Amino acid sequence: MTDEKNVGSIRTRKALIRKEMLSKRRALSEEERNEYSAKICNTFLESNEYKNAGSILLYKAYNNEVDTDMIFERAISDGKKVAYPLSRINDGEPDLDFYLINDPGQLTEGFMGIPEPDTNQELSKFTETADICIAPGVGFDRNCHRIGYGKAFYDRFIRLNCPKTVIGLAYSVQITDDFAPEESDRAVDKVITERETISR
C-alpha cells in the first residue's frame, strides 16, 4: 500500500470518528453539558499546571464544546494572562493569532460563527510562549491524539509555537479507540473529562 493510500485511509477513519463524536456530543442534554463542563473545569483549575501558569490560551465554547467560561473568570480573577484565538487562512495555510482578553465583551462572532477577539477594539496580541494551550477537539484517543474539525489550525499553531503544555477538554463520550494520526497531527499532553484525566 502506498503512503498516499495510507494517508487516505487515516483521513477516512478520522472523518468517521469526527462524525460519530459530533453526534454523541449533540446528544448530550444542556443539563449534562453544563454539569460535565463544571466538573472538567474544576479539575483543570485544581491542577498544578493551572496553579503554576502565568498565561493560558483558551477557546470560547462553540457547537456544544466544553464550556470554558469558568476557567476564564477564575484566571482573570487570579491575575493570569488569558488569550483567545483569531482564525484566518494566510497564503493557503491555517493561521491562529491569539489576543489578550480581559472581558467577554471583547469577543465577537467570527470564523464559522466561533466567538473570537474583536479586532475593532484595541487588543494586544499575545506573542509569548504560553504556559498552557487549551486545544478544542472533536475527539481524543487514550494516547491523547486529537481530532479537530479538519482545518489543522491548532496542529500548525502547536508545531510552530510550542506551548509548554497542551491540554484537551472533552466529555467522556468524546474519548474513542486509538486511531492512527497523520504525520502533521499534534497530540495533547493530557485530556480532562468529567470522569478522568488521561495523560501520555
Image: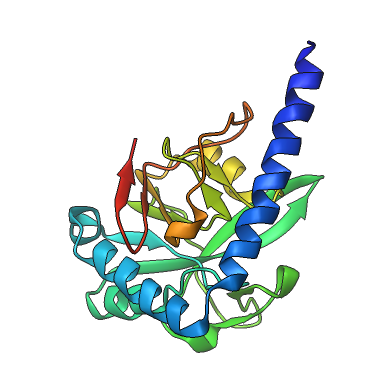
Task: Give the x, y percent position of residue 85.
Answer: 56, 63
Horizontally, is 32 left or right of 190 in the view?
right
Quarter that holds the N terminus = top right
Percent coordinates x, y for residue 8 in the rendering: 79, 28
Decide if residue 39 is in sight here.
Answer: yes
Relative image position of residue 135 (x, y in whole percent) = 49, 54
Question: Which residue is painted at 62% across and 31% down in the image?
Answer: 184
Looking at the picture, does residue 23 appear above or below residue 29?
above
Q: Residue at x 67, y 61 (%)?
A: 87
Quarter-of-image position of residue 164: top left
Q: Is residue 9 left or right of residue 62?
A: right
Q: Which quadrant of the figure has residue 14?
A: top right
Depth check, front residue: 200 or 128: 200
> Tell me, what colour scheme is on the image?
rainbow
Check the image and name the residue furthest to the top: 1
Left or right for 155, reference 87? left
Q: Which residue is at 64% across, 61% downward?
A: 22
Q: Residue at x 47, y 54 (%)?
A: 127
Q: Residue furthest bottom?
A: 105
Q: Quadrant of the C terminus?
A: top left
Q: Position of residue 27 (x, y in %)?
A: 59, 72
Image height of 20 relative to 32, above or below: above
